[in-house]
Amino acid sequence: MSKDKTPQQKLWEMIKDIRFGMLTHRHTDGGLHSHPLTTQNKELGEKGVLYFFVSRTTEVGSRLRVDGNVNVTYSDPHKDHYVSITGTATISEDMDAKQRLFNPMAKAWFPKGAGDPDLELVEVHITSAEYWDVKESKPTQLFKMAAAAVSGERPTMGEHHEVSVGAH
C-alpha cells in the first residue's frame, strides 16, 4: 500500500468506480446468500462505512437485523482490482443520510425519493478488508505465470494486503 494513503483511501480508490458490490449475509437456514447492491457512498470516510439502499419488500433488511455479519466484494477485472470487505451491517432510519445519499439512479427503485416508505438504508461498518491490486500488464502477467510454471516458483504480481479499517 502506498505510504501516503490510509487504508480507507486505498480501498475507496479501488472500489469507487465499481458500480455494484456483492453483499453476502447469512440466510435463515444457515447458508450464505449474496445480493448485488449499488454502493451509495460519495467517499469512504474515516469511520469506514459503506451505504446501500434496499427495499423493505425484500428479505435483506430483515436478515441483517437478525445477523449483521456481512462480506462485500468488489471486482474490476479490467483494472485487476479485487476487494473483499468484512463488516457489520445495520439498518438505519437516518433521514439526513438518506437524503444526502439519494440520487437519480435510486429514484428508479424508490420513486417517492429519500422519504419513500419502502427505502431502507443499509450501513456496513467495515472492520477489515483484503485487496489484490495487480499492476502488471496482461502480457507481463502471462509471462510471469509461464515462468513460474517452468520454475516451480509462485509468481509475484501486484499488491495484496489485509487491512483494519473502521473503528472497532
Image (spheres, grey):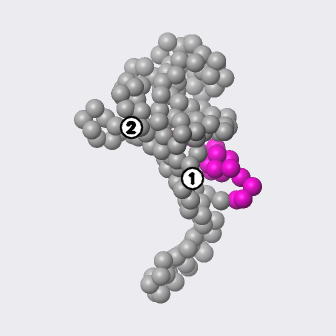
Q: Position of residue 49 (x, y in %)?
A: 58, 35
Q: Which residue is mark 2?
A: 25
Give the farthest residue toward the left.
Answer: 29
Asked if the stretch drawn in magenta spans residue 13, the answer is yes
Tell me how far mark 1 sits from mark 2, CA to CA.
21 Å
Q: Quadrant of the N terminus?
A: bottom right
Q: Position of residue 130 (x, y in %)?
A: 52, 54
Q: Left of 146 or right of it: where is 47?
A: right
Give coordinates of residue 62: x percent, y percent: 37, 24
* Segment tinted magenta in the rendering: 2-20
**Viewer-side residue, 142 vs 14:** 14
The quarter of the picture where residue 17 lies is: top right
Query: Left or right: 57 with respect to 148?
Result: left
Q: Position of residue 71 (x, y in %)?
A: 45, 43
Would residue 76 be visible to someone looking at this image? no
Q: Secondary structure at mark 1?
A: strand
Residue at 50% x, 19% y: name it. 119
Q: Residues within 10 Å of mark 1 (few under 14, many from 20)?
A: some
Q: Which label sits on residue 163?
A: 1
Q: Nearer the viewer, residue 149 or 88?
A: 88
Inspect this view and state whether residue 42 appears: yes
